[in-house]
Amino acid sequence: MKLLKLIHSITQTSNPQETTKPFLPEKLEQQYGDLFTGLGCLPGTHKIRINKTVAPFVHAPRKIPIAIKDKVKAELDRMEDIGVIFKQQEPTQWVNSMVTVIKPNGKIPICIDPRDLNKAILREHYPLKTVEEVISQMPNAKVLSKLDATSGFWHIQLDEPS
């Protein structure tokens, strides 16, 4: 039936726990060190388009366990300090509940539950290549890199109305 097909395989890997510091050649660090610090944002801003026929919704705040309130406050303060969030000074039509969970490493990521907002967002349509398409375009590749942008969505600034 030929339901499965091997597209690409990796025969040698490195152990990411072997290094204690992210590898960055000294010359690169000297010339471009500022690019590897701070939040970093893509150029431009993104506008979230809302379907005006969908009624706005305000969710009540969820309870935060007393045991993690200080950690949640510290994370919210950190996010505000680096410019990811800001305190809303005016009333707004859309309010999503904040969701907090404790990760195994002890960190507490701050998320929202945007279920109702998602119903109102008009989606942009960007065709993305599949992994197979990308790999087939580089048949002679010797080294592949994997990049993980921590909180990647923070790197796209929203315009003021969004």
Image (spheres, grey):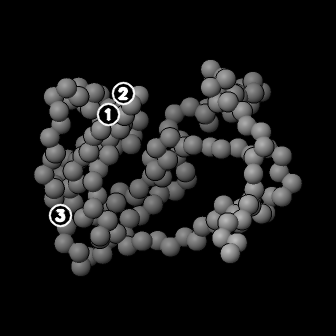
Query: Which corner quadrant holds the N terminus?
Result: bottom right
Would residue 136 appear left or right of 129 to someone viewing this image?
Answer: right
Amino acid type at image mark 2: Gly
Of callouts 1 and 3, the N-terminal one: 3
User: Disc 3 designates what residue?
Assistant: 57
Residue 113 seen: yes
Residue 87 image point, x, y percent: 25, 43
User: Disc 1 designates what residue?
Assistant: 102
Amino acid type at image mark 1: Ile
Task: Determine which quarter of the picture holds residue 160.
Answer: bottom left
Question: Which structural element holds mark 2?
Answer: loop
User: In the image, is residue 116 above or below residue 89?
Assistant: below
Nearer the observer: mark 1 or 3; the answer is: 1
Using the image as rendered, state which of residue 104 and residue 119 is in the foreground.
104
Cβ atoms at labels 1 and 2 below 8 Å apart: yes
* Distance in Å between CA atoms under marks 3 and 2: 32 Å
Q: Residue furthest top?
A: 20
